[in-house]
Image (spheres, helix red, strand yellow):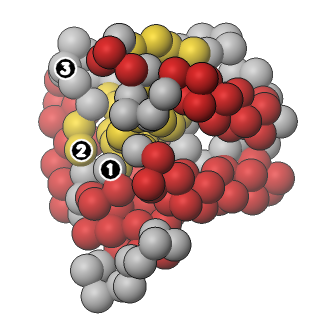
Amino acid sequence: MADSCPQNVTSSSTANAALEAARDAKSPIVLQVSQGGAHFFGGKGLANGKDQAGSIAGAIAAAHFIRAIAPAYGIPVVLHTDHCAHKLLPWFDGMLDADEKYFKEHGVPLFSSHMLDLSEEPKEENIATCVKYFTRMAKMGREYNQLVARFPLTRRRVARDGDWYHWW
């Protein structure tokens, strides 16, 4: 599993299965939630309009669940959020609000890393949006402000400060 892709989680069952497989392989793991997966984790009965309230609630629930159960598996875990397009920025903002709240209480953000996929936006707008979020995330400490940014022409650039991921 060490060389595998991040594992998408959409429920406590999928999170537990991924954690169990990583534990059995004696491997760290990257668990990630997408906007739709986060909404599913919270329950499709949650409203999820332009404000992305259902996806925000589901992502936060997934993060708290994974943070609570991961130590029992005894492996390093990264909690990542996947592909946030421009139209989903309210979801991103809600997760950063949760990161900031958790950071104030625990000294680390709730999520390990986030991915902005602004590849459909002009490069200048993409960079300006990333700078805005880097500035906000930097207040949570240099080793925790992990942001993967996707640029136009499908080139990926990893923007970071410190080590790639913070393992719990």
Q: Secondary structure at mark 2?
A: strand
The residue at 22%/24% (across/down) is 5
Tell me if 84 is positioned left or right of 114 in this view: left
Instruction: Say which quarter of the image contains residue 12.
Output: bottom left
Query: CA–CA distance between discs 3 and 2?
Result: 12 Å
Q: Secondary structure at mark 3?
A: loop
Q: Please state which amino acid type lies under the numbered disc 3.
A: Ser
The residue at 51%/72% (across/down) is 51
Instruction: Say which quarter of the image contains residue 41.
Output: bottom left
Q: Residues within 10 Å of mark 1 (few under 14, many from 20)?
A: some
The residue at 77%/39% (across/down) is 136
| Among numbered discs 2 and 1, the one appearing first in the sequence | 2
Q: Residues within 10 Å of mark 2 (few under 14, many from 20)?
A: some
Picture quarter with the C terminus: top right
| Among numbered discs 1 and 3, the one appearing first in the sequence | 3
Quick one: 92 or 59, which is closer to the camera? 92
Q: Nearer the viewer, mark 2 or mark 1?
A: 1
Picture quarter with the N terminus: top left
Query: CA–CA distance between discs 2 and 1?
Result: 7 Å
Q: Please state which amino acid type lies under the numbered disc 2.
A: Asn
Q: Secondary structure at mark 1?
A: loop
- 19 versus 127 height, above or below: below
Quick one: 24 or 11, which is closer to the camera? 11
Query: CA–CA distance between discs 1 and 3?
Result: 17 Å
Q: Nearer the viewer, mark 1 or mark 3?
A: 1
Tell me if I can see residue 162 in this picture: yes
- Point out which mark residue 4 bears: 3
The residue where tag 2 is placed is 8
- Point out which mark residue 34 bears: 1
